[in-house]
Amino acid sequence: MLDTLIQHQFLGFLICVIAYKISQYVSDKLKMAVANPLLLTIITIIVFLKITGISTEQFQVGGSFVNMLLAPATAILALSIYRQRKVLKQYFLPVVIGCIAGSITSVGSVFLLCKLFHLDQKITSSLLPKSVTTPIAMKIAESLGGISSVAVAAVVVTGIIGAIIAPVLIRVFRVKNPVAAGVAIGTCSHAMGTTKAIEIGEIEGAMSSVAIGVSGLVTVLVSMVFTF
C-alpha cells in the first residue's frame, strides 16, 4: 500500500499542499516575520522526505505539477492592479522609473558580487534574475546559459528575505507613501514580497504587482547587457 502511494504521480503535489496548509496555520499562529509560510513549507517537506525515505525523484513526479500553477498565480495579481488602476495612472512615471532603477541596481549588484568572488559565467547567469518571479527567472537563466534550478533557489531565498524584512525596512526608513513601498517590495522580492505587500495594504499590493511585470521586462534586457 505504502509503495503504491509513493509511486503515485500526485504524491508530491499532495505533500506540497498539505505542507503549505500546515505552515500557513503555524505562521498565522506565531505571527512572526521569520515564520514565513514558504520557508516553513520548504523545511516541512525536507523533514518529511528525510523521515519517510521518499527520494527527490519520486517527489518531483507530482511536485512538478506545482510549477504549472506558477504562471496563473502570477497572472491573478492583475486583479489588484485593475482595482487600483486610477492610482497607477496617477503615478505611472514614478512607478516605471522606480522599477527600472531597482532592476538595474539588483542585476548590477549581483554581477559585481559574482565578479568579486570569481564565480563562473554559468552561476552568474543563474543569479542575475534573482529578484524577478520564478517563471521569468527560469527563462532568463536558461537563455543566458545558466542553471534554472539555481535561479529558482536564488528567487526563493530573495523572496523569503524580502517578505521578512520589507515591513521592517518600511518602518525604519519611514516610508509613508504606499506607492513607493509597493514598488520597492515588488521590484526587490517579486511575488513572495507582493503577498506581504497585499497584507500591508491594497495600494501597496497593486503597485508591487505592477513592479513584478515591469521589473521582469527590465531585468531581461539588463541581464543580457551584463552578461556580454
Image: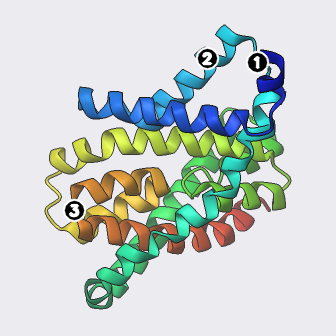
**Front tag of 2 and 3:** 2
**In this view of the protein, can residue 56 be seen by the observer?**
no
Q: Which residue is mark 2?
A: 48
Q: Are marks 1 and 2 in contact (CB under 8 Å)?
A: yes
Instruction: Return the x and y of residue 114 as percentages of the image width and height.
Output: 67, 40
Callout 1: few (<14), some (14-19), or many (20+) C-alpha neighbours within 10 Å? some
- Label 2 residue SS: helix
Question: Which residue lies at the image location 43% right of the left edge and 74% below the top edge?
Answer: 210
Question: Which residue lies at the image location 83% right of the left edge and 18% below the top edge?
Answer: 3
Q: Which residue is mark 1?
A: 54
Question: Which residue lies at the image location 75% right of the left edge and 36% below the top edge?
Answer: 119
Disc 3 residue type (three-letter):
Gly
Q: Which residue is mark 3?
A: 201
**In this view of the protein, can residue 92 be seen by the observer?**
yes
Which is nearer the eye, 212 or 67?
Answer: 67
Image quarter where the N terminus lies is top right
Image quarter where the C terminus lies is bottom right
Instruction: Reply above or below: 172 against 103.
Output: above
Instruction: Return the x and y of residue 61 as percentages of the image width and height.
Output: 81, 38
Give residue 82's quadrant in the image. Answer: bottom left
Which is nearer the eye, 202 or 107?
Answer: 202
Instruction: In the displayed orientation, state which residue is furthest to the top.
Output: 51
Disc 2 residue type (three-letter):
Phe
Callout 2: few (<14), some (14-19), or many (20+) C-alpha neighbours within 10 Å? some
Mark 1 to mark 3 CA distance (whole Å): 41 Å
Instruction: Reply above or below: 164 against 140.
Output: above
N-terminal of the two: label 2 or label 3? 2
Mark 1 to mark 2 CA distance (whole Å): 8 Å
- Label 1 residue SS: loop
